[in-house]
Structures are given as C-alpha cells and as structure tokens.
Amino acid sequence: MRRFFVFVLVAALWLSVPPAIASSERLEVQSWSWQGMFGRYDKAQLRRGFQVYSEVCANCHGLRLVAYRNLADVGLTDEEIKRIAAEKEVQDGPNEQGEMFTRFARPSDRFVSPYANDQAARVANHGALPPDLSLMAKARAGGPDYLYSLLTGYEDPPSGVLLTPGMNYNKVFPGHQIAMPQPLFEDMVTYDDSTSASLPQMAQDVTAFLNWTAEPELDGRHALGLKTLAFLVLLTGLLYALKRQIWSGVHGE
Ligand code: HEC
C-alpha cells in the first residue's frame, strides 16, 4: 500500500513539471565551469568571452550595468582597463559655463552603448531593438544554455517556412524568426591564448562572460558557502564532543 502511495506521489510530481521545462529540451545543455558548489568562473574563458563581446556583440548590444573597472574581475590590468575605456567617449557636465561636454570614458564609467538611443538602435536593425545584455543570462528560461543554443542555433529555414524579410531562422528562438543575423562564424576572432576560435568555443566563451556580467558575485558566494559548510561541520563536531562530555556521567549509572 505504501509503495503505491509513493508511486502516485512520484507520478504526480512528474506530471506537474511545467511544459516550459519540456520545451527547453531542445536547448544544447552545456556543462559550465561555475555550476555546482565548487564551481568557479574560468578567468581565461571570461577574458576570451569579453574579447568576443567587444569585437562582435558590442557593435549592437550594450552592457549598461557593467563599469569598465569591473573588468578587473575578468583578469584585466588597470592599464588595459584604462585603455579600453578611453576608446569611447561619454557626455559629461555641466562644466563651469553650464555646458555639457564630451570626454573620453574612464574606468569608473559604465560601458558606453553602441547607439545614441533606442530609436537609433531600431533604425539600424530593421526596427528590432538589440536588448542590453548585462542581465540577459538571467532573463531567459534556460539561462546560459539558452544563450549558447541561440548563438549556435542558426539554420536554413525548413522547406515551407517563409521568413519575413530581414529575419533569420533560429531553431531555439521563440517563433524561430529573429531579427539578429547570425553573429558568430568560425575563426571570427583571434584568441591571445591560442585557443581555436570555433563557433561552439566562441559561443561558450561569450556566454560565460555574459553569465559573469549577470552574476559577478558568484565566485564570492560559492566561497562563502564552502566556508559556512566547513564551519557547520566543525560546530557539529564540537557540539557532539560537548554532548558526550555532559552525558558521560549518566551512562555509568
Ligand atoms: C548586427 C547587430 C547584432 C549583433 C552584432 C549581435 N546582435 Fe544580438 N540581437 C540583435 C537584435 C536586432 C536583436 C533583437 C532580435 C529580435 O528581437 O528579433 C538581438 C537579440 C539578442 C538576444 C536576445 C534573444 C532573445 O531571446 O530575445 C541575445 C541573447 C543576443 N542578441 C546576443 C548576442 C550576442 C551574444 C552577440 C555577440 C556574439 C550578438 N547578440 C550580436 C542584433 C545583434
């Protein structure tokens, strides 16, 4: 009888899994370095991902929640960060004359967006707005697996599917028609660390970088989690020893 109830319970739980999970089965699930309790970002990978972002994605997508100085986490030196920031101009002011002025960006500035405003971004992209990518790894079901699958999911449309002009076929994008043209192609970037820039490699690297922009505190959180666990194990040991000592007189009676 009890087995029967357990069976019913398991079956009910299984059936109650929302269809969203079933439909995400098409995603190409990857194993990411930061997953699990001991997971950490791979700095070399984040650096490569930043390179892909800046050479490819940054032409259309901003990262308005990230400041240049945050790139220190990715392993860039202060000099590199200063140089990267100074390639962009930002508006500042007003100065003593009450006028706004432009100056080169500083490490404390946030990433400068590729377009002056959303309208300009739409005009350049057939009316579609390239979304800001700062939190994108958290904003879609499937998170990093979705980003990876999207970047590697461009295909010729199956026969019978008519694309709206200016749209591209992508097997994981909802509705399969996306305004973003395929952004990554084999060997599009040249990595400093001589990793070969295959499409899956670049897609993984830029996804890792975008996971870091969405969750930069992950490494610290995992480290704190491990310390807390170690502390709890120690505390359990101490309490056990204490309990034995307190009760030691009672056992002999
Ligand atoms: C030529 C401009 C362009 C480039 C380059 C580009 N994108 Fe896009 N991207 C777009 C546009 C436009 C959209 C909006 C698509 C839509 O809504 O149909 C978009 C949408 C997206 C989305 C959101 C998809 C969704 O589920 O809504 C992600 C994620 C994304 N891009 C990632 C990237 C990454 C990563 C790169 C670099 C490897 C990149 N893009 C390069 C133009 C671009």
Image: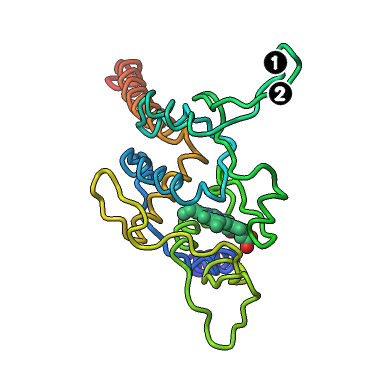
Kindly report the distance in space between the C-alpha atoms of the residues bearing marks 2 and 1: 6 Å
Q: Name the residue under label 1.
A: 95
Callout 1 amino acid: Asn
Residue 116 visible from this viewpoint: yes
Whether ligand 1 has any atom under 8 Å from the Cβ at mark 2 is answered as no
> Which residue of the protein is positioned furthest toward the top in this rendering?
96
In which quadrant will I find the C terminus?
top left
Q: Do the residues labelled 2 and 1 touch (CB within 8 Å)?
A: yes
Taking 145 as reference, is 213 above or below it? above
Residue farthest to the bottom?
Answer: 160
Judge whether 94 appears above or below 90 on screen. Answer: above
Answer few, some or many: residues within 10 Å of disc 1's Cα (few below 14, many 20 plus, some between 14 and 19): few
Earlier in the chain: of badge 2 and badge 1, it is 1
Residue 115 in the image: x percent, y percent? 63, 45
Question: Can you say whether 187 is above or below 242 in the image?
Answer: below
Q: In this view, does 118 lie to the left or right of 214?
A: right
Q: Mark 2 points at which residue?
A: 100
